[in-house]
């Protein structure tokens, strides 16, 4: 492992039910590149997925985003499309965290898992840039994690929003790199 803080690769919301909404066909290939590099470097891999129990007891009618998901019946824990995309091949040593809100920390035990492993730095990728990535960067920075965002490991339905977040907003709290640039540092 490279010198410096103990680092984990955090891959977020890379679920079939979510990825079908993002037309970036190269995204999964780029994620696999980051994943393979992390594994070669001995970095822990943590997957974060969003899903809900049958009946959606976690979803308040006041939550606009998740109320619409409840109405469609999507992202239930028991739905195979709520699993991490099968082509990404979650390994037994990986940790899979289930969250109940937009950010990776909200409604999950992610911080407990990271702190128990002595993780001080996170490398983030996932969808959507304006959803889980933004929410996670903001809170993780406030929690004093050292952050790297893989700009081409994220996608958003609005390319301009992605550009502004990765080019102007995230650099205030994180190092923003392409996957190739990050891999070259390992």
Image (tube, rainbow, N blue to C red):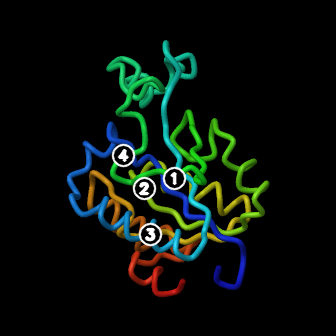
Q: Residue 4, how many percent across, how many down?
A: 71, 82
Location of mark 3 (residue): 36
Q: Are marks 2 and 4 in contact (CB under 8 Å)?
A: no
The first of marks 2 and 4 along the sequence is 4
Q: Quadrant of residue 3?
A: bottom right
143 relative to 169, above or below: above
Residue 93, image x, y percentages: 60, 54
Say which element carries label 1. loop
Residue extending farthest top: 55
Task: Give the spatial CA distance, label 1 vs label 2.
Answer: 18 Å
Distance from Cα at disc 1 to Cα at disc 3: 12 Å
**Residue in view at x 55 percent, y 58 percent:** 10
Report how far apart the C-alphas of labels 4 and 3 lie in the structure: 15 Å
Quick one: label 3, few (<14), some, or many (20+) residues within 10 Å?
Answer: some
Q: Quadrant of the C terminus?
A: bottom right
User: Mark 4 — residue?
Assistant: 85
Residue in front for this viewpoint, 74 or 93: 93
Q: Which of labels 1 and 4 is toward the front?
A: 1
Q: Is residue 156 above or below residue 175?
A: above
Considering only order in the chain, which callout, 3 or 4, is on the residue closer to the N terminus? 3
């Amino acid at each position: 492992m490279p010198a410096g803080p103990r680092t984990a690769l955090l891959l977020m919301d890379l679920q079939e039910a979510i990825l079908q909404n993002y037309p970036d066909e190269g995204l999964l290939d780029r994620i696999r590149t980051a994943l393979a590099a992390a594994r070669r470097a001995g970095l822990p891999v943590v997957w974060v997925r969003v899903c809900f129990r049958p009946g959606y007891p976690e979803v308040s009618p006041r939550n606009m985003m998740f109320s619409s998901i409840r109405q469609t019946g999507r992202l239930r824990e028991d739905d195979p499309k709520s699993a991490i995309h099968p082509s990404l091949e979650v390994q037994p040593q990986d940790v899979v965290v289930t969250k109940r809100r937009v950010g990776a920390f909200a409604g999950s035990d992610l911080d407990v898992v990271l702190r128990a492993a002595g993780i001080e730095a996170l490398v983030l990728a996932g969808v959507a840039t304006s959803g889980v990535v933004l929410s996670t960067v903001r809170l993780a920075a406030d929690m004093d994690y050292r952050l790297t965002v893989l700009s081409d490991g994220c996608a958003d339905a609005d390319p301009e929003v992605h550009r502004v977040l990765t080019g102007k907003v995230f650099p205030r709290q994180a190092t923003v790199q392409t996957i190739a640039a990050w891999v070259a540092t390992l």
